[in-house]
Image (cartoon, helix red, strand yellow):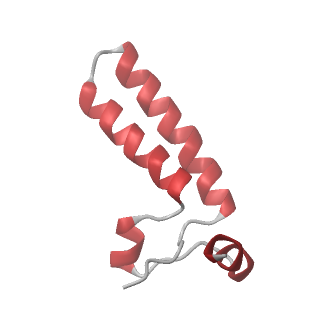
Amino acid sequence: MKLYPNVGKTDKIIRSIIGGLLTGAGIYYSYWVLVGIGVLIALSAVIGRCGLYYLLGVNTCTLEERKESSS
């Protein structure tokens, strides 16, 4: 089973910002669950795949972005 990218460019930017903010806040307040969630969100932005999107059938990635990442 081949997992194709399902996180688009705008979605990646939003995930990176939110992931960074959650990670920073979690480290600042020593709330490690928040750090884990922030890292997971940021990691999905870097990889370009989201497991929850697969389960829900959501894809924010354009056809051109899918072609670029599969090469």
Instruction: Find residue 20 and report its horizontal and vertical position in percent.
Output: 51, 33
Instruction: Find residue 43 and report its horizontal and vertical position in percent.
Output: 46, 48
Residue in the image at 47% along x and 65% along y = 49
Instruction: Find residue 38 and report its horizontal and vertical position in percent.
Output: 40, 38
Left or right of 15 on screen, residue 26? left
Residue in the image at 42% along x and 22% along y = 25
Left or right of 33 on screen, residue 19? right
Residue in the image at 33% along x and 15% along y = 29
User: Total number of numbered labels?
Assistant: 0
Q: In the rendered view, tell whether residue 32 sits above or below residue 70.
A: above
Front one among 22 and 65: 65
- Quadrant where the C terminus is found in the figure: bottom right
Front one among 35 and 64: 64
Residue in the image at 70% along x and 73% along y = 65
Instruction: Find residue 48 and report its horizontal and vertical position in percent.
Output: 54, 61
- Quadrant where the N terminus is found in the figure: bottom left
The residue lying furthest to the right in this view is: 64
Find residue 30 and report its image quarter.
Answer: top left
Left or right of 37 on screen, residue 63? right
Q: In the rendered view, tell whether residue 55 sits above or below residue 41.
A: below
Q: In the rendered view, tell whether residue 48 sits above or below residue 30.
A: below
Front one among 43 and 15: 43
Q: In the rendered view, tell whether residue 21 sits above or below residue 62.
A: above
The residue lying furthest to the front in this view is: 71
